[in-house]
Amino acid sequence: MSRRDQILSWGAALLVCIFAFYLLRAMLLPFVVGFAVAYLLDPAADRLEAVGLSRTFATAVITGAFFLLVVVLLLVLYPLLEKQTVGFLARVPDYAERIRGLTLPLIEGRIPGFDTQDLEQMRGFATVFAKQSVTWLVDAFANVWRGGVALFNFLSLIFVTPVVAFYLVRDWDRIVENVDGLLPRGSADVIRTQMSLVDDALSGFIRGQGSVALILGIIFAVGWSVVGLEFGLLIGLGAGLLAFIPYVGSIIGFGTAFVVALVQFGFDPLPLGLITMVFLIGQTLDGLFLTPHLVGGRIGLHPAWVMFALMAGGALFGLVGILLAVPAAAVIAVLVRYALGRYQGSELYSGVERDGS
């Protein structure tokens, strides 16, 4: 088979996979989540197996402990987060009004062309946004129970995901071995090298950056709640979740916390300083210990590329697309770097014909 025929065959297979994925996207959520959980837990299962446990028993221990922890966290945090989310959105008009009261005396008459109607329009927009957000949130929770498809996805996520994760973790090494056996022999070494780079990027981002985001979320949520920030639990966990996107997420999370604190406490330096100190403690711990030890230099994914991938995945395939966005971005980034390397080593780039060509 010629190189052109190989490219056409692989391209056709890729298009068929994408089309099938699009058709089946409504029922793929528990399988995608199960695969992600298995990817996260496989190293832990390997360690337990290395100390003498059977693969099946090690898998049962790891997956059981993981899902038990998830259930406990949901039972503890869900009521609090739901209450704080609805309360936060309901307070948006009040925040807008208090910000207006704090900033209007500072900028009125100092900015040429400033019109107080601009702030009124912003306040009106914030009010409409808050009302629509609360309505959407309430409807979303209700639709989980009313909608047949949504209820099916919810139940499948609860009952199917642990089973999928268990079998994938148990058979992970065998699956990898079988896939490796199907690689075209002439390109097997190149494919293994590129997939190793993809695994480094994914493990650095999902395992490493995910751990960093979780730890920072706990630090921010506990710290800001202790300081007395309104909705500190919600904002802190949100800031940690946004820290999944390096640099950008932490700045957005801290900016939200500081604005809420400014509205809540005014220009009182003590609470504003304490909120800033919590953020600086988290960032210092991240810079000195968390990122160097948990992530290192393995990510290789630019924050802008990650944000684009998340938004594109969500727009095309919904929640499943968001979950697959980072793995797809890692694969594309590795392939692009490989293609650029081949291009820079080619005659097209150098302009010099090689001997015998």
Image (cartoon, grey):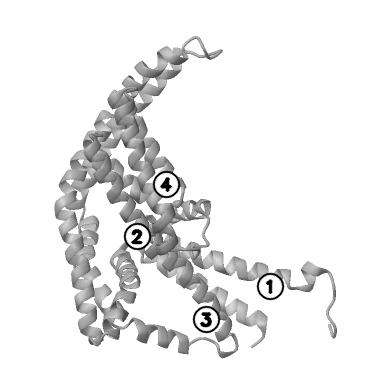
The location of residue 249, given as percent across then percent down, is 42, 47
Along the horizontal axis of the image, is 257 left or right of 226? right
Sooner in the amino-acid sequence: mark 3 or mark 2:
3
**The disc labelled 2 sits on which kind of residue?**
Ser
**Label total for image:** 4
Q: Residue at x 68, y 72 (%)?
A: 342
Q: Residues within 10 Å of mark 2 (few under 14, many from 20)?
A: some
**The disc labelled 4 sits on which kind of residue?**
Gly
The residue identified by callout 3 is: 192
Sooner in the amino-acid sequence: mark 3 or mark 1:
3
Q: Select label 4 or label 2 by which is in front.
A: 2
For residue 317, say whether it is visible: no
Residue 122 in which image quadrant: top left
For residue 52, say whether it is visible: yes
The residue identified by callout 2 is: 211
Q: Residue at x 32, y 76 (%)?
A: 42
**Residues at discs 1 and 4 in contact (Cβ within 8 Å):** no
Q: CA distance from mark 3 to mark 1?
A: 17 Å
**The disc labelled 3 sits on which kind of residue?**
Arg
